[in-house]
Structure formats: C-alpha cells, structure tokens
Image (spheres, rainbow, N blue to C red):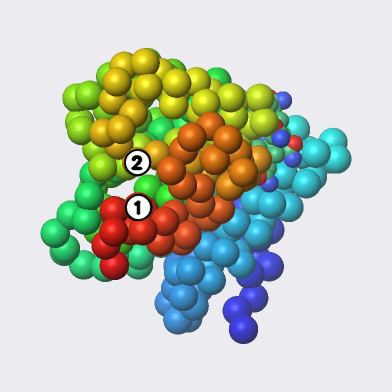
Amino acid sequence: MSDFKPLSEAISKGDVNAAVAETHRALEAGTSAQDILDKGLIATMNQVGDRFSSGQIFVPQMLRSARTMQECVKLLKPHFREGDVVSKGKVLIGTVKGDLHDIGKNLVSMMMEGAGFTIIDLGVDVPPEHFVEKVKEVDPDILGMSALLSTTMPAMADTVDALQKARVRNKVKIMIGGAPVTDKYAQKIGADSYASDAGSAVTRAKELLGIS
Ligand code: B1M
C-alpha cells in the first residue's frame, strides 16, 4: 500500500513543488491515478475542510491547498483517458452563480472527458441566464451544474426554472452534484440526475444518454 503522508502534508502546507514531486513519485512507483486522487488528494482536501470548519486555518491557507491540489490533478489527467474515441456526447458544465469552488467540477469534467465526452466548461459563478444562452448556442446533450455551498444550491433550481421559461428545458438532460447536493434535491428541483462523485458522474451521464 502506498504512503500518501508526504503528499498529504505537502497539500496541507500548500507546497506545490513538493506535492508535484510526490505525485510523480507515486505514479512512477506504479500507484494508480485513482488511488492518488481518492486516498491522497481528495482525502487531504476533506481534512483541510475540517481544519477550516474548526477555525485552525483560514481562507488563504485553504486556497493554497486547493491550488496545490489542482497542480497534482493536472498530472493525473492523462491517466484517465480512454484513448481517442468518438465523442459520447456534449456536456456543458459550470459552477452555479455565487459559487467559486471548481475543483470538484474540474474533476468531473476531467473524468467525463477521459470517458469520451466533449466538455464545454463555463467556469465558476455562472448565472442562470448564461447557462440558458449557452444551452441555446451549443445544444449540449447534458447540462452539468456543481455547487459547494448550501447558499448557492438554490441557483440550480433557478437555472432549471430559467431553462423552462426559455422553453429549452426539454432539449437537455440535467445532472447536478457537489458536496451539499443530494439525490432528493435533484428530484425536488426537476433535474434528471445526481452524482455524488466524478466516477459516478460518468456512469450517470452514460445512463442519461442510454450508452454503455
Ligand atoms: Co470553501 N467551503 N468556501 N473554499 N471549501 C467548503 C465547501 C466548506 C464545506 C468548508 C467548511 O466550512 N468545512 C464550506 C461550505 C459550507 C456550506 O455551505 N455547507 C465553505 C465555505 C464556507 C467557503 C467560503 C464562504 C469561506 C469564506 O470566504 N468565509 C468561501 C466561499 C467562496 C464562494 O464560492 N463564493 C469559500 C472559498 C473557498 C476557496 C476559494 C478558498 C477554496 C476553493 C478553491 C477552488 O475550488 N478553486 C475552498 C475550498 C478548497 C473548500 C473545501 C476545503 C474543499 C472543496 C473541494 O475542492 N473538495 C471545502 C470543504 C470540503 O469539501 N471538505 C469547502 C474536493 C473536491 C474533489 O470535492 O468539490 O465535493 P467536491 O467535488 C466532488 C463531488 O462533490 C462531486 O464530484 C467531485 C469529485 O468527486 N461533484 C459533482 C462536484 N460537482 C459535481 C457536479 C456533478 C456531479 C458530481 O454533475 C455536474
């Protein structure tokens, strides 16, 4: 079993060089990219979140850890590719209005891209009207929304309403996710699907489009 302690410490401290070196080391030692992601990177970010909640660290430290994690994720990206495949479908994705968290959304995008979907990423703090405009312009198969704050979750419902008002709701499947989001909430706001993590986002997306 791999020792993720040095990687975890580097991410906690926000030491990009050490974290990148540790990620390289783990890959070279044959550790799977999935294990590095789950047991090294995501597990550490959860600890960082707990330290923030308990007042041991503040936003600047959390941000440094987040940036460090993003650099490590870049190294893992090529390992999640299934190869050059014909696109399984177009996915328009973004973090909802008022929300700046993008690590989870980026992981979902990366996994979906690796599984053969074409990703159009609108970034963070995306207002409902921008989602609507892009749905009309891009005509995606799936619209993915991410929210990490309980205060920004209602923006998902607002976006579904805006799509309805613009008469484009039925043109696209809607998938939502993010730490405070639940299956029940997805049903409540009329989304088509909820995924709890990046791996299941790929499975749910394939289910939505009836592909394997
Ligand atoms: Co923020 N933050 N943050 N933060 N932050 C949380 C979310 C929080 C839980 C921390 C805490 O208090 N314990 C808390 C939210 C409380 C709540 O609302 N319930 C919080 C807060 C309060 C805040 C601020 C308000 C702090 C402040 O300013 N006082 C502020 C808000 C800014 C804003 O958005 N307007 C803020 C700011 C930040 C930073 C900018 C410093 C930074 C974000 C940097 C960035 O993303 N570029 C940050 C971070 C890093 C976190 C924590 C520590 C980590 C989030 C993360 O990246 N996790 C977080 C605590 C935590 O989650 N433990 C916290 C790793 C990531 C892989 O997981 O995003 O859950 P996650 O994504 C998963 C799944 O959820 C799912 O798949 C992903 C991969 O498996 N998923 C989807 C996500 N989107 C999906 C979409 C899908 C399907 C699945 O379909 C489309």
Q: Is residue 45 left or right of residue 90?
A: right
Q: In the rendered image, which residue does mark 1 sit on?
A: 208
Query: Which mark identifies residue 53?
Result: none
Along the viewing direction, whichever of 138 and 160 lies nearer the viewer: 160
Q: On the rendered image, what quadrant is the N terminus found in?
A: bottom right
Instruction: Give residue 61's quadrant in the image.
Output: top right
Q: CA distance from mark 1 to mark 2?
A: 7 Å
**Residue 87's x, y, as percent?**
18, 54
| Secondary structure type for disc 1 | helix
Q: Are marks 1 and 2 in contact (CB under 8 Å)?
A: yes
Q: On the rendered image, what quadrant is the C terminus found in?
A: bottom left
Which residue is painted at 53% across and 67% down in the image?
36
Label tally: 2
Which residue is painted at 53% across and 32% down in the image?
189
Query: Which quarter holds ligand 1?
Result: top right
Instruction: Give residue 2's quadrant in the image.
Output: bottom right
Q: Is residue 210 left or right of residue 27?
A: left
